[in-house]
Amino acid sequence: MARIELDPGVGVDLGCIPEHLARHEVDDTPVRVQQIIQTISVLEWNPLIGRPTRGELRELVIGRRSRGDVALYRYVADLDVVEEVKG
């Protein structure tokens, strides 16, 4: 099982999500945040699931349509670590 390490900027972004959703009058903020966390946790078991992008980076699509977002990350196989990077 791969270890997930978040860039400090990702933590800041996650902290801003509830405020952003409230500003846009989204009713299910806790559910939306939980969906993001659950989707990212899939990388523990499937670190190569994201589509390849530039260099060593991969993109994990979270949600769809107006509920969509993209997590940019790299997988370091030698260390079995997923490094979530700021997009």
Image (spheres, helix red, strand yellow):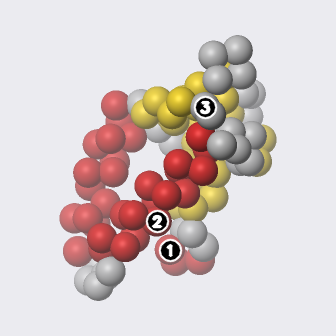
Q: Identify the residue position indicated by label 2 in the image.
A: 35
Amino acid bearing label 3: Ala
Left-right relation of 12 to 35: left
* Residue 48 placement (x, y as % from top left): 74, 40
Decide if residue 58 is in sight here. Answer: no
Left-right relation of 8 to 49: left
Q: Identify the residue position indicated by label 1 in the image.
A: 67
Q: Is mark 1 on a helix, strand or loop?
A: helix
Separation of residues labelled 1 and 3 (CA atoms): 27 Å
Amino acid bearing label 2: Gln
Instruction: Characterize the local packing of mark 1: few (<14), some (14-19) or many (20 or more) Cα atoms within 10 angstroms.
Output: few
Is 63 above or below relative to 70? below
- Disc on the earlier residue, 1 or 3: 3
* Residue 33 placement (x, y as % from top left): 37, 63
Decide if residue 14 is in sight here. Answer: yes
* Residue 40 placement (x, y as % from top left): 53, 50
- Residue 2 bears which disc, if any? 3
Asked if the residues shown at circle 2 and circle 1 are in contact, with their CB atoms under 8 angstroms apart, the answer is yes
Q: Residue at x 31, y 60 (%)?
A: 17
Amino acid bearing label 1: Arg
**Nearer-the-camera pick, 33 or 25:** 33
